[in-house]
Image (cartoon, rainbow, N blue to C red):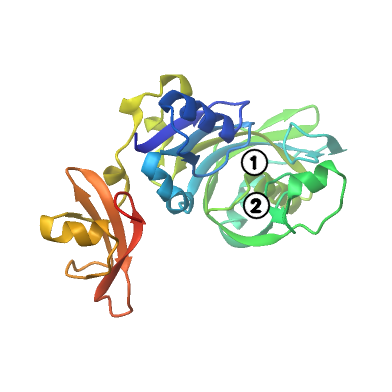
Amino acid sequence: MNGILIIDKPKGITSRDVVNSVVKRFNTKKVGHTGTLDPIATGVLVVCVGCATKLVDELTSHDKEYIASVELGTLTDTLDNTGNIKVSEKCIKTKEEIIEVLNSFKGKYMQEVPIYSAVKINGKKLYEYARENIEVDLPKREVEVSNIEFVSDIEYRDDKTYFSFKCSVSKGTYIRSLIRDIASSLNTVGIMTDLRRIRQGKFNVDESVTINNINENSLINIVDVLNYKKVELTSYKEKEVLNGAIIDNIYDSDEVLFIKNNEAIALYKKYDKDNKKLKPYKMFKGGR
């Protein structure tokens, strides 16, 4: 059982819960997801099954698109509405003010990782420090917001401002942190109240399935997922490729996916700077 599942994760369960459901459904332990969604979040969770688990890192690196809902005037320890309230203040902002700040976040910036995350410091996950009330310097890393736009009517309730935005971001971007930073630029505080991932790389929520509807027909062939030059494996090259040998590059490409009978056999990438040789990068069949 090999392939890719595009699952619409429901609210209230973890990404690991989804993986466990797939493990049970297909009776295989070779299952992995390609980008964690918080329990509060819904939407696209790309799950790899069987030999497709070798593509987890490859697929995790793709950009992601979200629709996020925000409450301005409130701050919690988790940066969303599931946490303990630390600050609550009156906050009335106009749509024009918000749009101006949203536009200012297009591009790259250094984002501080939230304390309630699985990022490790000295071998320990940040949320473990948080639960033990241990202060720790939070790391920052460069992220990129390639697009961000206001997508809902603004609302005012109980002296708070509510709105939603859509954004496309790079790997490693925390939307909770982005909302915190947007609120800071508005001279207030803010939390995430809802999050839906509508795209990861080429995978769109419109082509997703629910956990209850997963079956063999839901699996997407690895061959249809990878955007590399595809070469049908001939008998005279088959032994070399299956053994993971370095081969001559006669394919006018520095990345080649060898296939046979519409099944992925091996992904090869360039071996030398002159691109005269190819070496195995991911073996789906064979000895490595």
Instruction: Name the residue that disc number 1 marks.
Output: 95
Residue 210 x/y as whole percent: 45, 24
Most extreme residue toward the left is: 235
Question: Against 274, is 129 above or below?
Answer: above
Residue 188 visible at all: no
Residue 88 x/y as whole percent: 85, 36
Task: Give amino acid for label 2.
Answer: Val
Residue 240 visible at all: yes
Label 2, label 1: how far apart the Cα atoms are: 10 Å
Instruction: Name the residue that disc number 2 marks.
Output: 101
Residue 36 x/y as whole percent: 57, 41
Q: Is residue 20 left or right of residue 266?
A: right
Q: Secondary structure at mark 2?
A: helix
Task: Give amino acid for label 1.
Answer: Lys
Look at 44% across and 24% down and name the residue there: 25
Residue sitting nearer the eye, 73 or 1: 1
Most extreme residue toward the bottom is: 274
Classify the position of the C terminus by image quarter. bottom left
